[in-house]
Image: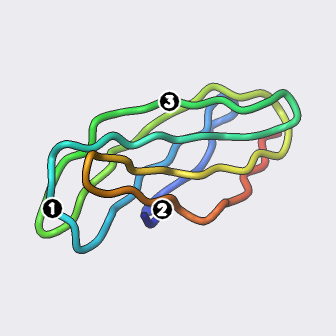
Amino acid sequence: MVLATYGADGETIYASGIVPGLSEDSGTCTLTASGASGPVSASAPAHAAGGSVNCGRITVPVSVGTWSITLRYTSPDASGESAPTEVVIG
């Protein structure tokens, strides 16, 4: 799992990603942001496209502070997680 894009807009953190070399439509992508107020997660279905699995933009609500985000892909046949990435709000 590789983060393709990520960022923040003041009250939310968003991310999208890809799983290169895998082509299936049965998986789920989950964005988790962990900060001082605890973890926040949101999930969306993944989609196969051009020899990879795409996780479209997923958004989670957050408060001001420093957050560590990870994007995880899970399916019956495969799983993977991006490296943690720091995002600062405010």
Q: Secondary structure at mark 1?
A: loop
Mark 1–mark 2 distance (CA, rounded to whole Å): 17 Å
Residue ID at (83%, 33%): 64
Q: Which residue is mark 3?
A: 42
Tag 2 or tag 1, which sits nearer the N-term? 2
Compared to residue 67, the image places residue 37 above or below, namely above
87 left or right of 26? Answer: right
Q: Around disc 2, counting alpha carbons within 10 Å, would you say few (fewer than 14), some (14 to 19), or many (20 or more)?
A: many
Q: Position of residue 85 (x, y in %)?
A: 67, 60
Report the Cα–Cα distance between label 3 and label 2.
15 Å
| Residue 7, placed above or below residue 9 | below
Residue under the image location 19 percent in, 47 percent down: 47
Element at label 2: strand
According to the image, label 2 marks what residue? 3
Above-or-below relation of 38 to 24: above
Q: Quadrant of the N terminus?
A: bottom left
The residue that mark 1 highlights is: 23
Q: Residue drawn 32% across and 64% down? A: 19
Amino acid carrying mark 3 in the image: Ala
Circle on res. 60: none
Type of amino acid at the residue the image marks with label 2: Leu
Mark in front: 1 vs 3:
1
Give SS at disc 3: strand
Q: Residues within 10 Å of mark 1 (few under 14, many from 20)?
A: some
